[in-house]
Image (tube, rainbow, N blue to C red):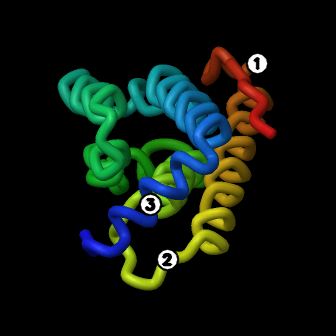
């Protein structure tokens, strides 16, 4: 974590509070839907439990932690692209409102917010499109 970025990240989050909070809520719901309908079919229940703990933690760095470590188990047994949509959305969001990069500015944070939203919406579309195959409950939340 970069000390000067902690203040900048907090200022950005407060300046865009409703947008950031709505995206975080929708993103976590979308990832939970993905975990429940896709990942849980190929992962051990204890791993799914850890992923859910990460998502419920409120800690940006934990959101993708366990899910990220399961790349091989899920991408070799299941659909690869939606997995990477989930990982990318979580990481873009963490980059937007976190303090891990030394040269992050408001413009880059805004780009990361939009990228997180775009990846989330792609994942929502994938879940919706695959609903008929029994892979998804297809819950979709629109964020502007």
Comparing labels 3 and 1, the label whose residue is closer to the camera: 3
Q: Pointer 2 and pointer 3: residues touching (CB < 8 Å)?
A: yes
Q: Few, some or many C-alpha atoms within 10 Å of disc 2 (few <14, some 14-19, many ≥20)?
A: some
Drawn side of residue 141 relative to residue 5, left or right: right
Q: Nearer the viewer, residue 40 or 7?
A: 7
Q: Which is more toward the observer, 11 or 68?
A: 11
Location of the C terminus by quadrant is top right
Quadrant in the rendering for residue 141: top right
All told, the count of numbered labels is: 3
User: Secondary structure beneath disc 1?
Assistant: helix
Distance from the alpha carbon under mark 2 to that under mark 1? 41 Å
Residue 36 placed where, x, y %?
46, 21
The residue positioned farthest toward the bottom in the image shown: 103
Between marks 2 and 3, how big is the CA–CA gap? 9 Å
Q: Earlier in the sequence, mark 3 or mark 1?
A: 3
Placement of the N terminus among the 4 image quadrants: bottom left
Packing grade of label 1 (10 A; few <14, some 14-19, many >=20) is few
28 above or below 136?
Answer: below
| Residue hosting label 3 | 9
Q: Residue at x 28, y 45 (%)?
A: 62
- Helix, strand, or loop for circle 3? helix
Question: Residue 15's spot in the image, x, y percent?
Answer: 60, 50
Which mark is drawn over residue 132? 1
């Amino acid at each position: 974590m970069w000390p000067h970025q902690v203040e900048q990240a907090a200022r950005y989050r407060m300046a865009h509070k409703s947008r950031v909070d709505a995206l975080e809520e929708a993103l976590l719901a979308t990832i939970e839907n993905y975990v429940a309908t896709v990942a849980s079919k190929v992962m051990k229940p204890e791993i799914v439990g850890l992923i859910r703990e990460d998502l419920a933690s409120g800690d940006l760095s934990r959101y993708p932690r366990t899910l990220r470590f399961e790349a091989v188990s899920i991408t070799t047994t299941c659909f690869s692209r939606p997995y990477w949509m989930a990982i990318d959305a979580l990481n873009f969001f963490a980059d937007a409102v976190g303090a891990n990069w030394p040269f992050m500015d408001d413009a880059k944070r805004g780009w990361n917010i939009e990228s997180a939203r775009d990846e989330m919406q792609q994942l929502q579309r994938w879940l919706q499109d695959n609903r008929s195959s029994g892979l998804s409950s297809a819950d979709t939340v629109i964020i502007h």
